[in-house]
Amino acid sequence: MAALPRRIIKETQRLMQEPVPGISAVPDESNARYFHVIVTGPEDSPFEGGLFKLELFLPEDYPMSAPKVRFITKIYHPNIDRLGRICLDILKDKWSPALQIRTVLLSIQALLSAPNPDDPLANDVAELWKVNEAEAIRNAKEWTQRYAMEDN
Amino acid sequence: MESDDMDYSDDDDLDDAMDYYGNEDDIDNVDPKKTDPEFFMYECLTVDEVEKVLNESVEKLSNSLKITPSLAKVLLNEHRWNSNDIIDRYRDNASNLLVSSRIKSGNGKKVAHVTLLCPVCIQSHTFDKFQNLSCGHSFCKNCWSMHFEIQVSQGISTQIRCMAAGCDVLVPEDLVLSLISRPQVRDKYNQFSFQDYVKSHPELRFCPGTNCQVIIRSQDLSSKKASCKTCQTSFCFQCGNDYHAPTNCVTIKKWLTKCADDSETANYISANTKDCPKCNICIEKNGGCNHMQCMNCKHDFCWMCLHDWKSHGSEYYECSRYKENPNIANESAHAQNLIHLQAREALKKYLHYYERWENHSKSLQLEQQTLERLKNRINEKVMKGLNSTWIDWQYLFTAATLLAKCRYTLQYTYPFAYYASMDPTSSRKDLFEYQQAQLEAEIENLSWKIERAETTDRGEIENQMDICEKRRLTLLKDFFPTTTSDMNS
Ligand SMILES: [Zn+2]
Ligand SMILES: [Zn+2]
Ligand SMILES: [Zn+2]
Ligand SMILES: [Zn+2]
Ligand SMILES: [Zn+2]
Ligand SMILES: [Zn+2]
């Protein structure tokens, strides 16, 4: 593999020196393009108290192409499917080479605070979120308890 | 059906029709626009010819607005190549037009980029290494060119955007081409842009034929039949699918989707329903028991062999080689039965039309095979020199071509009829069904005569051809789909 571009080195340094509050992103020891990410469930969201593991990979043509991000921890969310894939515009057609790992992770954190059932990826979850938000939130809290707590 | 190696008909349908009627009507006085419901004026163009057409529009617009050809292309592509509309809007409010066409940024203020650090590669470069867009966003040329290459590799060309986050400004062609160095990538870019231009141009359609480069152009933007002169593929000029008159574009799409979706349900119905052997009403098997009683006439019969149940007695188990399905054995609530009944009736109706649609499609294929057989037999005759020459039999191939054309139209009357039958407001339903039945009868008649061509009189076949085509044209004249109003949409 070619030498790591300056851009990736710079971004990694900054992520380590000034981490985003509530988010940790650490490059893998053997692959500097692969990041182990942990996002803390935002306050006042059904994910509060949870620690969500994600993986982030910078493809060969990054930053011309968007990073690949996926939830590893199971999460009950209308824009995240069972395989952990995320429906987020900046990861797809709205990607810009001027965006960074940092902005992507912040957007994902924001998505946890503000689920958007009108642009669903997990259809059954989105459906419930629309017809019975209270029950959907109950499910999300339960999943957070069951899958995203430190002691399991 | 397309013309074959004998080359008896390489001109389009209009010419065919004119040949038939050439003897009867004085063509000079007949305006085909009025007499032929399928009349369609179009031309088949090559890529070079289309490029010329597009470039003329670009040049004209660029001259009258005093903008670069590259920007004129963006404007035309974003406005379906409607130059007059663009010029009006430009005169009215140039700035609005440029913003809505994503040539200029809506934010107004130009972002002055003073640092010499490129925000994408995070590297410092000298001033001349930077390139900015009309929005003011500036990045190093190296990053721009990588961005362009990646976009082109994803099939994106005219829609390549500025690299700044949230900036929608499009990168004009001259800038893209000036920064792409690899010739293959430039070719790809030009190729994709050309596709975008043709797709956004209302008068142009790519021929859907496999590997065909022809582009069809017409100013008549209706659901008429366009036939490519190079690969002979025919299609509906409006929607690009197979030609489908008298059904309109929306309805044929609905119908084809339904056919695809319902094939499973239809299979279920044919596996789980049979008609009562006595009164022929449709009965669904909703339990495992093969002793059926018709809810209409109370006839008792065996599901497996359709024989009278009484005749079975103790031999029942010998008749049935299948195991009963215990899961569905006891569900026969009356209410559920009613719902099933309605669904079944709806499906029966659909199947009625679908079977005819399918059947004519199969007949088309079979008739093609018949024609091949005929050809071989005629070949033999001609070889043996039995009082006939090749020319003497040409009329038969013309007849077969006409039969295929008529049957094709007949096939496409069924989706129309299906949706019309469900629309209580459709007042011309009866007329349509009458004409459909007439056409069907004459087509079967012609098919019969062609199959027995060696013994049928030539005059008789030609007379029948004439009747068929007239029926077909009458139906199309009365029911050719219009874009604005449709009896069955
Ligand atoms: Zn750069
Ligand atoms: Zn910009
Ligand atoms: Zn073609
Ligand atoms: Zn169409
Ligand atoms: Zn019966
Ligand atoms: Zn039986």
Image (cartoon, grey):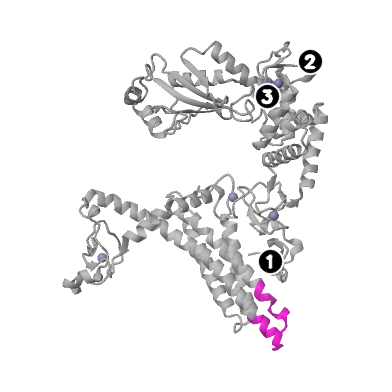
Crowd class of label 1 (few under 14; some 14 to 19; many from 20; radius 10 Å): some
Q: Where is ligand 1, by quadrant?
A: top right
Q: Which quarter of the figure has residue A16?
A: top right
- Residue at image position (56%, 73%) is B447
| Left or right side of B147 for B287 | left
First-in-chain label (2 vs 1):
1
Q: Is mark 3 within 8 Å of ligand 2?
A: yes
Observer-side mark, 2 or 3, equals 2
| Label 1: which secondary element | loop
**Residue A76 screen position, x and y as percent:** 38, 27
- Residue at image position (73%, 22%) is B94
- Count of picture labels: 3
User: Mark 1 falls within which chain?
Assistant: B
Q: Which mark is residue B127?
A: 2
**Residue A130 screen position, x and y as percent:** 38, 28
Crowd class of label 3 (few under 14; some 14 to 19; many from 20; radius 10 Å): many
Observer-side mark, 2 or 1, equals 2
